[in-house]
Amino acid sequence: MMSNSKMTTLNTVLKLRDLGLCIIPSGGGNDGKHPLGKWKLYQEKLPSDTAYKSWLYSKKPSLWGIVTGEISDRVVVDVDPGADLAVMRDLKPHVRTPRSGVHYYFKYPGYHVKTQAGILPKIDIRADGGFANVIGKNPVTDGEYTIEIMPTPEAIYSWEQMPEAFLAKMNGGEQATDPVPKTEPGEIIPEGQRNSTLTSLGGTMQRRGMPPEAIQAALLEVNRLQCNPPLPEKEVLVIAKSVTRYEPTTTRQSEAPNITSARALSEWDFEDLKFALPGMIPEGFTILAGKPKSGKSWWALQAAYSVALGENLLDGSECDKGRALVLGLEDSMRRLQDRVNKLYASDFILHSSTKLKGGGLRMRVTMGKAEIPEGLDLAVKWPKIGDGCIEELEKYLNEHPDTRLIVIDIIKRITRKKGRGTTYDEDYDSIQPLQELAIKRGVAILGVHHTRKALSDDPIEMVSGTFGLTGGADCIIVVQRVAESESKFSFSGRDILMQELAMQFNEKSHRWTCLGDADSHFISGERERIIECLGNDSLSPSEVSRLLGKNPSTTRTLLFKMLRDGQLEKDNKGKYTVDKPKIDPRRFKKKGG
């Protein structure tokens, strides 16, 4: 089991990675201060998720560092003990090293800055091609690197704050200049190319981090010296304004193909798949869909309550205890308080349940916990995806690493469509940030959703939206009401067995209870009604569905199953009759209607 210090280190590593820093395992070399293995590749591309999994499971590093320079958008000033700190003025360090040295983090300026040792006595610059340890214990000396200020974009120092004593000695003794792109000296920009050339120059300057005023001044100067004839000043100002209107875009580096042989893969050691509720809610993103007022919100809240309690309230079985977060985005705090109190009032441990002939339940129970579980958190407001949703969830997970389940009720309240691409693409992209977060952090995220009005034999087709929504989820749970208080829950997913369970919602205790396999509970009663309906007659599927008041498609499917099981016969006109030698109506005992 991972210690608290290692868990804290790992959470910090993941947070640094999410900030865009190229963070890799360290602890190599005779002094334990160098990257583990070959790392030149990571001076140009960020590690993939597969690389991180391989490091965590095989190398299990105790020390981590960042590749400095352009790849991490950071330049690190490494100050050893005994150096003259006056040169750093009143700047505070971000990282403290085992021997009382310190690291200061600056934003990468947008042009090449080489790593230089001894730029001043006992002071090094870690930039392009460099590396700096950031957190964890040196495996050789057991010395610890600690973060004093998290190097987030807001907390690092700007390039303008870099001490002039360093700037004068960087890059071979020449002070770096602002990265103003220019055409070749003296090159004339002819009519017909002036607008496109100035726009291109402005875009390059913006991507390199130049402020709008500097871009405007540079374009005016290029226009005056090189455009023939110069454009009107007003037109150049319009170009500058259009270029700086949007945030600069960054090019996302594509991951190189990661190929593994089947033999090697068969020897990998993965942790067992984790479940929030055993067999029902695995780690990853799960959609819970049902009609309005079908009790799906109560089911989701009960699932979270169970996780915080460490006991599955559906059937009384144990589940791994952990923290749970419920985002009740259609609720008020008053309503959530009322629902939690009702669950608490009905908190008992169910040891067994037996269905009675009259439709009731005989249950053997004992009273549960004396207090509402502490590990259940609730919120009624949350930002949308793209406005801070994922960042806030990451923050919560960092603060609560024991979290096992996050409920989002409903997912429509936090997703936002961009109005680009097909409807399928829009649906798929809308939930991908949630799915990726769940897989990356090893937690279960349960998104409550609605079903469409149209019925279908395939529960997945009943989920509102395109297949882009269901295709992007790891697991689908569909709720279908069968009787007044009983529903069928259909489970399907990438990592779980397909199953259909019968569940009952008690209006008095406000609790869902699992009644077992849905076929055993519901279908025998439905088959009995079909046999009674047919009697001695020969009827078509449409006639049977009309007489029973059932959906034609569902009735046709059940008739086919009964034909397959030898309970019915079918004539050449497509009509069904009871296969009397095989059917004894007395064999069918009523099971819940």
Image (cartoon, rainbow, N blue to C red):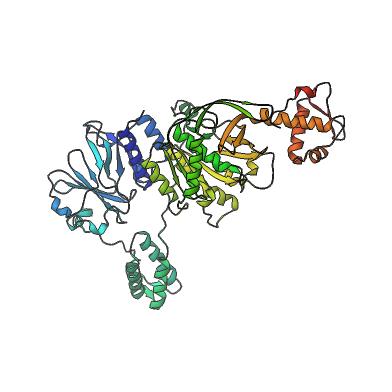
- Residue at horizontal 26 percent and vertical 47 percent from the top: 149
Query: Closest to the observer: 469 or 218?
Result: 469
Q: Quadrant of the C terminus?
A: top right
Instruction: Report x, y in % for residue 428.
Output: 55, 47
Residue 265 vertical position relative to residue 90 in the rendered view, above or below = above
Extreme-top residue of the structure: 581
Q: Quadrant of the N terminus?
A: top left
> Horizontal and vertical percent for residue 539?
85, 35
- On screen, residue 301 versus residue 481, left or right, reads left
**Residue found at x 32% / y 50%:** 152
Q: Position of residue 139 (x, y in %)?
A: 25, 31
11 relative to 172, above or below: above
Number of numbered labels in the structure image: 0
Observer able to see residue 473: no
Comparing 545 with 437, the one in front is 545
Where is residue 588 shown, x and y percent of the image? 75, 25
State whether residue 262 is above or below residue 423. above
* Residue 214 visible in image: yes
Q: Quadrant of residue 561?
A: top right
Give the residue at x 58% y 32%: 513
- Nearer the observer, 530 or 4: 530
Q: Quadrant of residue 451?
A: top right
Look at 80% across and 30% down and name the residue there: 531
Q: Give left or right: position of 110 versus 557.
A: left
